[in-house]
Image (cartoon, helix red, strand yellow):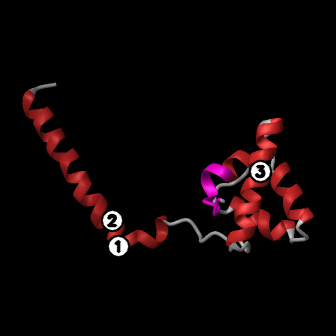
Amino acid sequence: MRYDDASRSLARLRGLDRWGDEYDDVHWEDDDDPPAPPLQLSPTQQAALASAITEGVQERGCDNTLRAAEAWVTSAGLDWGAVQAGLQGRGGYCDCEVLFNVGLTTP
């Protein structure tokens, strides 16, 4: 590649940052994920769920399921489907992802 070609390519790349901001200003709604369903857990419940998941993962490891979360939700008498939707809507598709991605209130 010649210097002139490289120079023009670099100038185009520098312009992409500005173009990206302009695009986002116009189309920001199109790029956003839909809002996550409500988590429907109080801060106290979130802390208890986080503790139960932590204990479950420490005992058995993460088996790529929501086994520990479901066990706690069921034992607490809560609606598993609603809580599961809230967890998965925030990136919690297994017990360890709930701890890393969901942002539960912790004790």
Closer to the eye: label 1 or 3? 3
Q: Position of residue 89 (x, y in %)?
A: 67, 63
| Type of amino acid under label 1 | Val
Inspect the magenta stretch and tell me whether residue 102 lies in it: yes
Q: Is label 1 in a helix, a strand or a loop?
A: helix
The residue that disc 3 covers is: 53
The residue that disc 2 covers is: 23
In front: 81, or 74? 74
Residue at screen point 86% across, 71% down: 79
| Type of amino acid under label 2 | Tyr
| Type of amino acid under label 3 | Ile
The residue that disc 1 covers is: 26
Q: Residues within 10 Å of mark 1 (few under 14, many from 20)?
A: few
- Give above or below for 57 relative to 19: above
Q: Position of residue 56 (x, y in %)?
A: 81, 45
- The magenta region covers 99-106
Closer to the eye: label 2 or 3? 3
Q: Is residue 16 left or right of residue 80?
A: left
Q: Position of residue 81 (x, y in %)?
A: 84, 67
In front: 54, or 90? 54
Mark 1 → mark 2, Cα distance in angstroms? 5 Å
Q: Is residue 62 left or right of residue 73?
A: left
Mark 2 → mark 3, Cα distance in angstroms? 41 Å
Does the residue at mark 1 contact the one at mark 2 (Cβ under 8 Å)? yes
